[in-house]
């Protein structure tokens, strides 16, 4: 009860006209940041952090978290329109979102993405409101072994549930792991695979790889296929929003499942990226028309977007109650908290009630404001596809170059992006899936780190991965996901044998 | 349309970090935006300090040109240091350092040294505290040491930030003083280390005060001793009526190890006296602001401020000491 009173007090704070104005500004800036690939939420929030030093902490966090929501929404736009994910967790959105845009259904895809984002985030906020204290203690149970188990599950659900030939999936994933290994080995503190090249010290940044593989690769493909966008006939009025809304409730099961996956992954330190991949992989297997995933299925947009936003929102909770950021953006927000004299940690909820509940209230309102802002812009975004390819392609190239450059302010990264573009083109031509490669670049070094930390702690014994109910459960789920097709086939055969040959005719 | 929105964003950011001019006392002044390099990731201790400084400069309009924070964390910060080393004669680039100024070239062989840079000022020193989970029975450093001695070698897990960096150097020193072996587990960030200790995934840590203070206040962690020559100066109670001041030195508990981490500013090579003087004056003004003092208090920093020859002397001594410590611990890269 006390929580509800606090929440309503929070609403009162967040609903002050000044704060609502900050919310709208924050969302708009966030969407812009999200649209620019490479700029990303973390850089965006960092650039705008100084703006907020003259505000009260509550107003400042409302604005900054709205930038965060805006960036989450904005990431979907370029993924769907141009196959360029602006954020790691938007990669899975491209799988079906981009084919939809090519079929002239950009408006539908955008509406589905924005609405799903909203649903996922709302679900996570409700969860935060209700079970905040429980969640914090659950997050504490995650040591290195548990973290590795979560990454393991993410990888397995992708290999096992993928319909691509498993060997091509694994080959692509291995290239990703090799790329992820470049740079500093965080366990021994030594450099790996840098060959004395200064530019490789930082390893291969995920964003540069993705902008190249997807963005540049796509432009090369389009050039080969005749220099035209295929999404030109997209409907550009607001009615498309309502029509899509009519269709969306059909996918409530996918939505709900994605909400749970997202919240769960967000509370564990794994975060939004594996959540979106896992949710997509599972939806592909469970959905009635799973076979059409990857060809422009609206459900394939709903699943990753819902999970990513549920995770992104749920990740803010460990940040506030434990002081551990769940994402780079959260890390910058955390720095902001300290500058305003607030100490994230177990006492924040006790000592800074107004701040915490103001923030939670702004999560509700920020998401509603965000949804309204982006939905009204759907026709504008969809109309971009009507611009002739010869005009838009150079713009995309410039956008990609700016994005790649702004990751580390380095021109080397721009070259690297172009190289990745050629690689992406070749891989697509040879029918290798890009997603496992990207997943491995994003999570490879984290999974490796957690694995080696676990073994250090257990003095080299693999028993640590089955040492308690939590880690064992996740590992076993991972193994089931990995061998899912084999299990399913075995089950079908078993049933056939039990039922006997007579029933087969029926 | 895209491009114009990006420009608009850039303009807003530039306008807001630019601020209003204040007459400067030094003869030289920046004529374009100053890059403030952080050789570490976003959200870490050095990054927080750099962004606090950026905030103070903006709020009090201490510079005519914007100060732009840029993270260059690759190769344990080597990326950032090489960038500044390669920007000789460019006075519009400064870097904030942590102990990786000494440890990174030694552990990785990345070719730079503090001698390649121009020292500006020491802003503060970060303390290191020995922490355990509050549920553990040991209340003092001595009880902890006795427990460590009684346990089989390697069974006690020490968590820390990074590999072959300050946390592991201290761990090795504690091992030597106690006469046992820990299992050292490296993590990416200090906040993560503190939470791993709260969750009992490691047995002790040597977190900086700012990384673990929230958990101390929440009654989850207990500070045992500080790796400094004298107790910390801050007497405001934090938890259970205890203040930073009440945390005894590790030396008094029989752990003869002192370690403080540099939070200092360097410039690119070949900076002129006027240029160094400008930044020294700037940081003097920053140190005088109430925001800076609050920040120092929240992280229980040692607020020693050094400039010029004194600063260079301190850095040189610390460099020698790191070479000895790293060599002893077997942390040197093969090429060194």
Image (cartoon, rainbow, N blue to C red):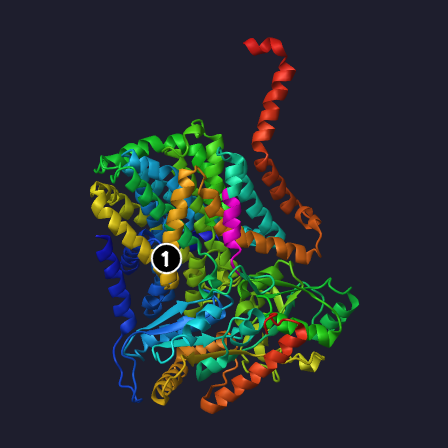
Could you tell me if residue A65 is visible in this image? no
Chain label for disc 1: A
Magenta-colored span: A172-183
Return the x and y of residue B248 as percentages of the image width and height.
Answer: 64, 79
Q: Viewed as shown, does residue A238 lie left or right of A247?
A: left
Residue at image position (56%, 43%) is: A153
Q: Nearer the viewer, residue B33 or B225?
A: B33
Q: Nearer the viewer, residue A411 or A255?
A: A411
Is-magenta flag for residue A407? no
Q: Viewed as shown, does residue A5 lie left or right of B225?
A: left
- Residue A25: which quarter of the image? bottom left
Could you tell me if residue B76 is visible in this image? yes
Q: Is residue B141 above or below residue A436?
A: below
Residue at image position (52%, 89%) is: B313
Return the x and y of residue A383 as percentages of the image width and height.
Answer: 22, 42
Return the x and y of residue B120 as percentages of the image width and height.
Answer: 42, 84
Is-magenta flag for residue A181? yes
Q: Main secondary structure of the magenta part?
A: helix
Count residues near mark 1 (Cα–Cα under 10 Å), then give few for <14, some for 14-19, many for 20+.
Answer: some
Secondary structure of the residue carrying tag 1 is helix
- Residue A432: which quarter of the image? top left
Q: Nearer the viewer, residue B58 or A402?
A: A402
If the image is split into quadrants, where does the C terminus of chain A sit? top right
Q: Is residue A506 above or below residue B7?
A: above
Q: Viewed as shown, does residue A436 lie left or right of A384?
A: right
Return the x and y of residue A254 as percentages of the image width and height.
Answer: 44, 34
Residue at image position (55%, 83%) is: B233
Residue at image position (56%, 47%) is: A150
Query: How many labels were placed on the picture?
Result: 1
Which residue matches tag 1?
A415
């Amino acid at each position: 009860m006390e929580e509800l009173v606090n929440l309503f007090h929070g609403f009162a704070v967040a609903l002050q006209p000044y704060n609502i104005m900050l919310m709208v500004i924050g969302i708009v800036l966030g969407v812009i940041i999200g649209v620019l690939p490479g700029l990303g939420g973390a850089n965006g929030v960092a650039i705008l952090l100084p703006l907020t030093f003259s505000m009260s902490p509550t107003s400042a966090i409302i604005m900054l978290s709205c930038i965060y929501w805006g960036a989450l929404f904005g990431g979907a736009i370029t993924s769907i329109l141009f196959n360029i994910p602006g954020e790691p967790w938007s990669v899975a959105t491209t799988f079906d979102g981009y084919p939809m845009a090519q079929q002239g259904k950009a408006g539908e895809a955008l509406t589905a993405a924005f609405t799903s984002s909203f649903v996922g985030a709302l679900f996570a906020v409700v969860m935060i409101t209700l079970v905040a204290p429980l969640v914090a203690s659950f997050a504490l149970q995650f040591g290195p072994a548990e973290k590795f188990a979560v990454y393991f599950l993410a990888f397995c659900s992708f290999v096992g549930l993928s319909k691509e030939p498993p060997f091509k999936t694994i080959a692509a994933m291995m290239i990703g792991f090799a790329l992820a290994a470049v740079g500093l080995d965080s366990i021994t503190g030594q450099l790996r695979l840098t060959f004395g090249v200064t530019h490789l010290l930082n390893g291969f940044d995920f964003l540069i790889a993705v902008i190249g593989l997807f963005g540049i690769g796509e432009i090369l493909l389009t050039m080969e296929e005749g220099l035209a966008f295929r999404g030109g006939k997209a409907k550009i009025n607001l009615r498309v929003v309502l029509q899509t809304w009519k269709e969306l409730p059909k996918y409530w099961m996918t939505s709900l499942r994605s909400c749970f996956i997202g919240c769960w992954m967000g509370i564990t330190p794994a975060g939004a990226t594996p959540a979106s991949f896992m949710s997509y992989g599972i939806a592909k297997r469970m959905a009635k028309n799973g076979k059409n995933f990857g060809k422009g299925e609206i459900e394939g947009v709903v699943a990753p977007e819902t999970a990513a936003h549920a995770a992104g929102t749920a990740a803010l909770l460990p940040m506030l109650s434990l002081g551990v950021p769940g994402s780079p953006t959260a890390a910058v927000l955390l720095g902001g908290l300290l500058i305003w004299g607030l100490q994230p940690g177990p006492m924040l909820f006790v000592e800074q009630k107004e701040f915490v509940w103001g923030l939670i209230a702004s999560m509700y309102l920020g998401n509603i404001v965000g949804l309204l802002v982006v939905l009204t812009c759907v026709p504008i975004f969809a109309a971009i596809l009507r611009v002739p390819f010869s005009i838009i392609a150079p713009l995309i190239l410039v956008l990609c170059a700016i994005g790649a450059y702004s990751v580390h302010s380095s021109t080397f990264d721009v070259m690297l992006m172009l190289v990745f573009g050629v690689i992406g083109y070749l891989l697509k031509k040879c029918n290798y899936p890009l997603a496992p490669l990207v997943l491995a670049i994003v999570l490879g070094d984290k999974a490796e780190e957690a694995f080696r930390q676990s073994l250090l702690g257990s003095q080299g014994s693999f028993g640590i991965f089955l040492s308690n109910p939590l880690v064992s459960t996740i590992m076993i789920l991972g193994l089931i996901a990995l061998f899912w097709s084999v299990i399913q086939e075995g089950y079908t055969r078993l049933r056939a044998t039990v039922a006997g040959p007579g029933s087969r005719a029926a | 349309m895209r491009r114009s929105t990006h420009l608009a964003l850039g303009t807003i950011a530039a306008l807001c970090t630019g601020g209003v001019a204040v007459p400067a006392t030094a003869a030289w002044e920046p004529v374009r935006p100053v890059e403030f390099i952080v050789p570490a990731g976003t959200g870490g201790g050095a990054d927080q300090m750099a962004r606090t400084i950026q905030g103070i400069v903006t709020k009090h309009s201490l510079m005519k040109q914007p100060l732009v924070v840029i993270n260059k964390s690759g190769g344990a910060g080597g990326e950032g240091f090489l960038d500044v080393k390669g920007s000789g004669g460019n006075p519009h680039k400064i870097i904030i350092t942590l102990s990786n100024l000494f440890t990174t070239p030694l552990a990785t062989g990345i070719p730079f040294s503090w001698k390649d840079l121009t020292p500006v000022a020491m802003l503060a020193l970060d303390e290191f505290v020995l922490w355990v989970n509050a549920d553990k029975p040991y209340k003092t450093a001595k009880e902890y040491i006795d427990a460590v001695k009684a346990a089989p070698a390697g069974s006690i897990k020490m968590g820390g930030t990074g590999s072959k960096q300050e946390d592991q150097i201290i761990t090795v020193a504690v091992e030597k003083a106690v006469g046992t072996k820990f299992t050292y587990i490296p993590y990416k960030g200090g906040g993560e280390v503190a939470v791993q200790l709260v969750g009992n995934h490691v047995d002790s840590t040597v977190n900086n005060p700012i990384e673990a203070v929230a958990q101390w206040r929440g009654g989850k962690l207990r500070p045992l001793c500080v790796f400094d020559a004298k107790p910390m100066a801050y007497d405001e109670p934090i938890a259970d009526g205890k203040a930073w001041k009440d945390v005894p030195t590790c030396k008094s508990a029989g752990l003869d190890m002192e370690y403080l981490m540099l939070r200092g500013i360097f410039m690119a090579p070949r900076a002129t006296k006027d240029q160094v003087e400008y930044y020294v004056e700037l940081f003097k003004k920053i140190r005088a602001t109430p925001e800076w003092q609050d920040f120092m208090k929240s992280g229980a920093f040692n607020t020693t401020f050094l400039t010029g020859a004194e600063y260079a002397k301190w850095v040189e001594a610390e460099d020698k000491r790191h070479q000895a410590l790293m060599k002893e611990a077997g942390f040197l890269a093969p090429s060194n």
